[in-house]
Image: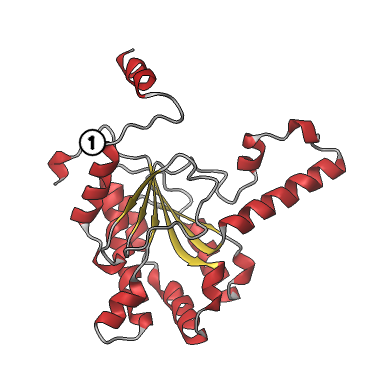
Amino acid sequence: MTQQLDMTRIPAHIAIIMDGNGRWAMDRGLDRPFGHKAGLDNLEAVTTLCSNLGVKYLTVYAFSIENFNRPAYEVEALMGLVLNFFKMGLFHNNHVSFHVAGDLKRLPQSVQDKLRSMEEETAMYDGMALTIAMGYSSKQEIVDATKRIALKVKSGELSAEAISEETIREHLWTAWMPDPDLLIRTGGEIRISNYLLWQCAYSEFYFCDTYWPDFNEEDLHKAIASYQSRQRRFGKTEEQVENEDRV
């Protein structure tokens, strides 16, 4: 399948909603936390695959603010998995830097400390950037950005007339990274669940039925092949894009 990909058109930024962990476990007669463990194990494999393909940014939805409404035992188990998941070899061997996006103060202090230490320990790497969205809500991200912009207007640091799309982008939790080229959701659901709403305005979407723990190299290549089969127009006509490609 790799040979069928155009290696000059690998998406620079892939975002993933890693869905189906709980259902994967329940189908096997296991408690849902076993599915989250399998999902985190698979994230290691997919991170390496993306790095080897030349993807520059990989951003994955690990835990939303809404997920705090799940049974307490499941939330506690997932937080414990996060503490024990990250193996430095994954980052050292692939020169991957680690980042986190979300409202971290909602997370247990031990998890906050772990995530921040991972950012510090991998900051020197210039390969792919892996970002984990934890305690994340896109609507809350936009609200937070709006509040910070409003404070700058109130203080006179910024005029209301100067506010632009770029101003908002610069105040998002993901300000340092480009918008996703491709958004993948596993698990059979066809929605984006409050994930990167601003950033995905012109992303290509790919949905598949495969549960995240089973999402493998072939599935990843299918998603990228689907992306490469599409013409990204960003509001322009097909003819305009084709003429630009000829130049």
- Residue drawn where x is 37% and y is 81% of the image: 32
Amino acid type, residue under disc 1 in the picture: Met
Position of 38 relative to 222 (above/below): below
* In the foreground, 171 or 226: 226
Residue 54: x %, y % from top left? 30, 42
- Residue drawn where x is 46% and y is 79% of the image: 80
In this rendering, the count of numbered labels is 1
Q: Residues within 10 Å of mark 1 (few under 14, many from 20)?
A: few
Residue 122: x %, y % from top left? 45, 54
* In the foreground, 75 or 119: 75
Farthest top residue in view: 247
SS under mark 1: loop
- Residue drawn where x is 67% and y is 34% of the image: 164
Farthest right residue in view: 155
Residue 39: x %, y % from top left? 33, 69
- Residue drawn where x is 78% and y is 31% of the image: 161
Position of 157 relative to 30 (above/below): above
| Quadrant (top left/top right/bottom left/bottom right) for the C terminus | top left
Question: Quarter-wise, where is residue 230 in the image?
Answer: top left
Residue 38: x %, y % from top left? 30, 73
- In the figure, is residue 33 to the left or right of 1? right
Q: Mark 1 points at which residue?
A: 7
Position of 113 relative to 56 (above/below): below
- In the figure, is residue 120 to the left or right of 6? right
